[in-house]
Image (cartoon, rainbow, N blue to C red):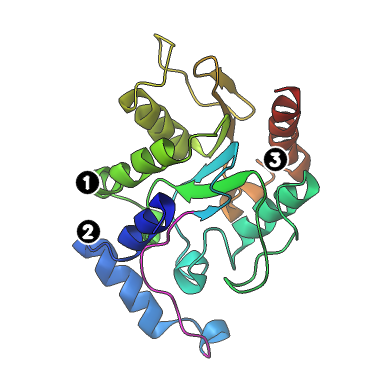
């Protein structure tokens, strides 16, 4: 078994956080009316994409009726609609819609992961839950050796990605960068971190994040990769 497949199997079997285990399994049992005929994944959601990717997307956590239902990152929810449309526009995805884990979507030169792998109640994670998931992100950063650009979706993902990069010894900056949409952080000579607001409904419905704003980050990533 290759390293990323082995890691993803470990992630899917994780039961480190009792509160998250209870919640994700409760959601999978009770479901919601519009998905009442579907079998929910109801487990931690592994990363997904091209193991040789140069672009890494880091989100926050699975949505209760999105990835917690489908078993694939950003699949089956409104945030995923925004993300995969942008990825398709700039050539990282073969289709612009992500509906289920068996819908034929594939990623090229892109890998998607998250700070936490379980859907949290009220979309709120506890500090110890984030800490429990940290080793998975660290291992991904080690395995995905071709990564040149990281896009962090939201402040928490940005801050935790910075922390993980520091822990792996990849950073050359002295002062910890602050999150700002469209921000660019040169991590070292090979790696650049880009920041975006998360495409959550809280941001997209209110207009805090527009499609041009969101897509500009992916355009910047594509241009940087093209120059390499």
Residue 84: give x, y in percent of width and height. 68, 54
Q: How crowded is mark 1: few (under 14 residues within 10 Å), some or many (20 or more)?
A: few
Q: How far apart are marks 2 and 1 (CA)?
A: 8 Å
Residue at image mark 1: 128
Of residues 124 and 149, the one drawn nearer to the viewer in this rendering: 149
Q: Residue at x 79, y 48 (%)?
A: 89
Q: Residue at x 57, y 43 (%)?
A: 52
| Residue 117 appears in the figure | no
Q: Residue at x 36, y 60 (%)?
A: 118
Disc 2 + disc 1, Cβ < 8 Å: yes
Q: In this view, does 73 lie to the left or right of 171?
A: right
Q: How crowded is mark 2: few (under 14 residues within 10 Å), some or many (20 or more)?
A: some
Q: Is residue 217 left or right of residue 66?
A: right
Q: What stretch is highlighted in magenta?
A: 37-47
Residue at image mark 2: 17
- As helix, strand or loop, the secondary structure at mark 1 comes to helix
The first of marks 1 and 3 along the sequence is 1
Residue at image mark 3: 214
Disc 1 + disc 3, Cβ < 8 Å: no
Q: How far apart are marks 1 and 3 (CA)?
A: 30 Å
Residue 122: give x, y in percent of width and height. 38, 60
């Amino acid at each position: 078994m290759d390293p990323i497949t082995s890691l993803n199997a470990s992630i899917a079997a994780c039961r480190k956080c009792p509160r998250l285990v209870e919640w994700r399994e409760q959601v999978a049992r009770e479901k919601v009316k519009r998905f009442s005929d579907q079998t929910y994944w109801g487990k931690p959601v592994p990363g997904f994409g091209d193991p040789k990717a140069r672009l890494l997307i880091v989100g926050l956590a699975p949505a209760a009726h999105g990835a917690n239902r489908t078993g694939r990152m950003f699949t089956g929810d409104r945030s995923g609609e925004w993300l995969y449309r942008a990825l398709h526009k700039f050539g990282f995805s073969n289709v612009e819609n992500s509906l289920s884990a068996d819908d034929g979507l594939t990623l090229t030169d892109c890998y998607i992961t998250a700070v936490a792998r379980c859907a949290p109640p009220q979309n709120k994670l506890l500090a110890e839950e984030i800490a429990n998931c940290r080793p998975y992100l660290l291992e991904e950063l080690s395995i995905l050796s071709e990564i040149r650009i990281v896009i962090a979706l939201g402040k928490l993902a940005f801050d935790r990605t910075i922390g993980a990069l520091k822990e792996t010894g990849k950073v050359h900056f002295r002062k910890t960068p602050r999150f700002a949409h469209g921000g660019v952080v040169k991590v070292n000579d090979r790696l650049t971190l880009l920041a975006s607001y998360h495409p959550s409904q809280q941001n997209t419905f209110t207009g805090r994040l527009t499609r041009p704003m969101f897509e500009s980050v992916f355009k910047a990533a594509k241009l940087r990769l093209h120059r390499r």
